[in-house]
Image (tube, grey):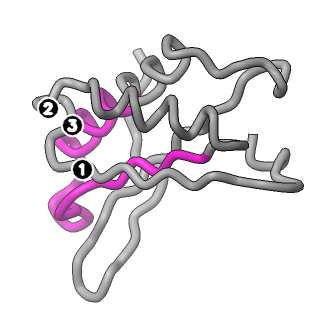
Amino acid sequence: MRLARTDLLVLLGAEKLGVSICRAVSRPKDSPYTSEQATDPPDKKLDGIVASTANVSREEAWARQILHGFAYDPQPADAIIHAWEMTDVALEADTILPVTKMDGEDAYLY
């Protein structure tokens, strides 16, 4: 069993935030990003966020988590936002989901 981890711990002023990354990409890149693909990563990531929040040390505990989505163009970005809107509110907890739509030379992110 793999231990759930948060990718980054950041400080915003004095507040600690946990950050996890989700990449919305299809292979091959020009194929549509399906609703099934859009639903799977956030659900898995949210499960991991709940687990990592429960297991973080007291010294490093964060106030809330951010699940930052990266999408290579508008279509997968829209799909992941739609999937987020359909996610069970209990699973979301108090996680924030910003989505960055990447344009140009961004292959290194995926």
Q: Residue furthest right?
A: 105
- Residue 13 point in image, percent of width and height: 29, 88
Front residue of 17/33: it is 33
Instruction: Please give the residue where the numbered disc 3 appears in the rendered image.
Output: 92
Q: Which dot, 2 or 1, sits closer to the camera?
A: 2
Kind of element beneath mark 1: loop
First of labels 1, 3 by sequence position: 1
| Corner quadrant of residue 39 | top left
Q: Residue furthest left?
A: 90
Instruction: Please give the residue where the numbered disc 1 appears in the rendered image.
Output: 56
- Residue 69 point in image, percent of width and height: 51, 46
In the image, what residue occupies the spot 15% across and 41% down? Answer: 93
Q: Is residue 6 left or right of residue 92?
A: right
First of labels 2, 1 by sequence position: 1
What's the magenta region?
A: 45-70
Marks 3 & 2, CB-CB < 8 Å contact: yes
Q: Is residue 75 left or right of residue 14?
A: right
In the image, what residue occupies the spot 39% across and 64% down? Answer: 9
Instruction: Please give the residue where the numbered disc 2 appears in the rendered image.
Output: 89
64 part of magenta stretch: yes
| Corner quadrant of residue 29 | top right
